[in-house]
Image: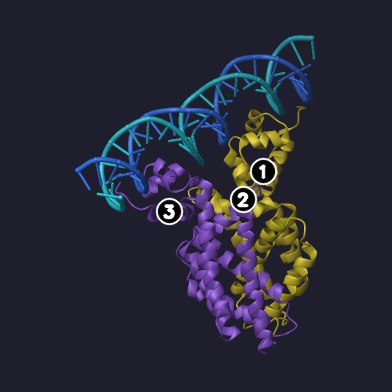
Chain colours: A purple, B yellow, C blue, D cyan
Amino acid sequence: MSRETTDIRQEQIKKAVLDIIADEGLQNISTRNLAKRIGLSEGAIFRHFPTKRDIIKGIMEDVVNDLVGSLRNIVLTPEKSESKLFKYLCHNVKYLKENRGITMLLFSEAAHLGDNELKEKLNQILYEQKQFIIKMVKDGISEGVWDKSVNAEDVAIIYMGIPITFNIEFILNKNGLNAENFCKRMYLLMLKILQK
Amino acid sequence: MSRETTDIRQEQIKKAVLDIIADEGLQNISTRNLAKRIGLSEGAIFRHFPTKRDIIKGIMEDVVNDLVGSLRNIVLTPEKSESKLFKYLCHNVKYLKENRGITMLLFSEAAHLGDNELKEKLNQILYEQKQFIIKMVKDGISEGVWDKSVNAEDVAIIYMGIPITFNIEFILNKNGLNAENFCKRMYLLMLKILQK
DNA sequence: TAAGTTAGTAAGTAAGTACTTACAACATTA
DNA sequence: TAATGTTGTAAGTACTTACTTACTAACTTA
C-alpha cells in the first residue's frame, strides 16, 4: 500500500467504519474488516489510532464539529424562525443520509453505558440539538408567528424523532426515500404544531 | 442449577438478552454472559435454543405477538379514534419502558442486512405499526373530527419517532422520565397536527 | 547524503466468540 | 422399577477479536 499521512488515514478509517455499519451492520466493524475495506494491513490501523474505541470517539467528535456545528450556524443566523426551522430540518436529514451509519453507531454506543466518556459525548450531541430546537421555537413565539401556548421542549422531543425515523426508513428502504421531499413534508407537520 | 422446562428457560434467556442490552449494552450479549446472568452453564443455553440467532428471532416474534398484537387490538376496538390514538401511544411507550432493550436490538438488527429473515421480521413490525396509525388517522377523518387535508402516512412517520425518542431518552436519563406524562404531552402535539 | 522519523507489513499474542461433546442426575411413563 | 426422555454440567472445539512485535521501506530534514 502506498504511504499516506495519518490525517488522511484517520479520515479513511472513520469513513470505513460508517460505511461498514451502513452496508454490513454494526457487528462487522472489526479491525480486520476495517483494514480489508481500506486495503491496509490490520497493524496499520493501530498506527493511526491507539485503540478501536478512539476511532468511535473520533467519529463522535466529528458529529459534534460537523453536524452540531453547522446546525448551530443555522440557528444563530439572523433570519425568520420559520425558514430557519426548515433549513435546520433539511440539513439534519441530509447529513444523516450522507452518513448513514452514524445514527446506528450513536444508538449502539448509548447502550454501552459502561463507557462514560462516550455516553457524555452522545448526551452532548442530543442535548445541544434539543436546545437548538427549543431556541428556534421560542424565537418564533417571540416573533409572534407561533402559538405561545405550545411547549418548546415537547416540540423539541417530537422533532428529535424525525431524523432518526428517516435514518431507519432509509436503511430499510435503501434507495426509495427522497430526503428533500421527506423534510418538506415533516416541516409542514411541525408547522401545524406550531401555528396559532 | 435446579431443573426447569424449556418453556421457562426460553423466557428467561430472552429476558436476559433484553436486560443485558439495557444494562450493559449491545456488545455484551455473548452466550457466556447470558449464561452467567441466568446462573446456568453456557451449554444449557444451547439445550433450549439451537443458535444465538434463534434467541434474537424469538424476541422479534414476541414483539410481533405481544406489542404488535395488543396495538392491533386497540386499533380494532370500536371506539372514537381520538381516545384510541391516546391509548395506542401510551401502550406503545409503556411497552418500550418495560422492555428497554428492544428498540436497541431491533435497531442493530436493521443494520445486519445480510440476514434477510430477521430484516423481514423487522420490516413487518415497523410496517404494520405504520398501517395502524394510518388507519386510525383515516378513521378519525371519516368521523369528521380530524382535518381531511392531512396526509395519514406523514402522520404515521412523525408518530413512529415518538416511542423511539422515548426509548433513547429513557436509557440516557435512566429513571427521570415518566411514561404516562410523556405520552400525554406527545398526544397533545399529535392532536394539533390532526385537528382542523 | 546521512540520520531520524513516519507509515507500512507479516506474523504473532491472549482472550473471547458461538457452539459441541460426553456424560450425569433427575423426571415421566410402561 | 426399569426404560426413556429431559435438563443440566465441565471441558473442549475452531474461529475471531483487539492489539503487539519485529522489521522494512519511504519520506524529511541537518
User: Which corner quadrant of the image does residue B12 belong to?
Assistant: top right
Residue B55's disc number? none
Q: How crowded is mark 1: few (under 14 residues within 10 Å), some or many (20 or more)?
A: many
Residue C11 in percent (x, y) is at: 37, 29
Between the residue at mark 1 and the residue at mark 2, the CA separation in whole angstroms equals: 9 Å
Q: Mark 1 lies on which chain?
A: B
Question: Counting residues from the N terminus, which is met first, the one under dot 1 or under dot 2?
Answer: 1
What amino acid type should be assigned to the residue bearing mark 3? Gln
Q: Are marks 1 and 2 in contact (CB under 8 Å)?
A: yes
Residue position marked by numbered label 3 in the rendering? A10
Residue located at (66% from left, 50% from top): A113
Residue D5 in percent (x, y) is at: 68, 24
Residue position marked by numbered label 2 in the rendering? B105
- Per the image, label 2 sits on a secondary structure element best described as helix
Residue A160 in percent (x, y) is at: 63, 68
Which residue is at the front of the view, C12 or C3?
Answer: C3
Task: For residue B131, say whether it is visible.
Answer: no
